[in-house]
Amino acid sequence: MDSSKAFLYLVFLLFSLHFFMALATEFAVGGDKGWAVPKVKDDQVYDQWAGKNRFKIGDTLSFEYKKDSVLVVTKEEYEKCKSSHPIFFSNNGKTIYKLEQSGLYYFISGVSGHCERGLKMIIKVLEPESPPQSANQTSSTSNGATAAAPTAMTFMVLFFGAFLY
């Protein structure tokens, strides 16, 4: 193998690793503030943080807190700020929660009064992207134009495939 092909293989490997590492993201809930009771009663603080992010299956949420807890609950329990049988519970100060399916997730604090003061959050996990369509299977958009969405991996394979042969 000559040096130019070896270099291209190396570049391809690095791009592939970067692509696969980007598949899942760890989000630090609340950013620098972490999972803490808002200074002013505000039940939208964490929903606003969540609204600025896009969550997908496989992503993880990292909750950092002191003397508190993280509960995953039903919608009804979220609205009541109370759960006697949460779907998930942790109170170890650093909780990592993996988002394993699309849909809505409801998080609350398990410490009395904290949820009511705003320590709660709804996360929406997006549906997985559908696989790219073949050139013969384009779809129509609402304005009648056809759309095909090749992925970054498709471009990488085509780009490097042209150099390797």
Image (tube, rainbow, N blue to C red):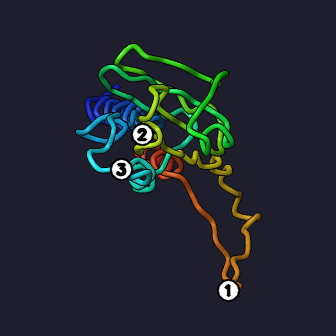
Badge 3, how many Cα within 10 Å: few under 14, some, many 20+? Answer: some
Q: Outermost residue toward the top?
A: 92
Give residue 119's mark: 2
Number of the front mark, 3 or 1: 3
N-terminal-most mark, 2 or 3? 3
Q: Outermost residue toward the left?
A: 32
Q: Is residue 25 left or right of residue 122?
A: left
| Residue shown at the point (54%, 43%) measured from the top left | 56
Q: Position of residue 165 (x, y in %)?
A: 47, 42
**Quarter residue 93 falls in:** top left
What distance separates the C-alpha of mark 1 from that of mark 2? Answer: 43 Å
Q: Quadrant of the N terminus?
A: top left
Badge 2, how many Cα within 10 Å: few under 14, some, many 20+? Answer: many
N-terminal-most mark, 3 or 1? 3
| Residue shown at the point (76%, 65%) measured from the top left | 136
Q: What amino acid type is highlighted by mark number 1?
A: Asn
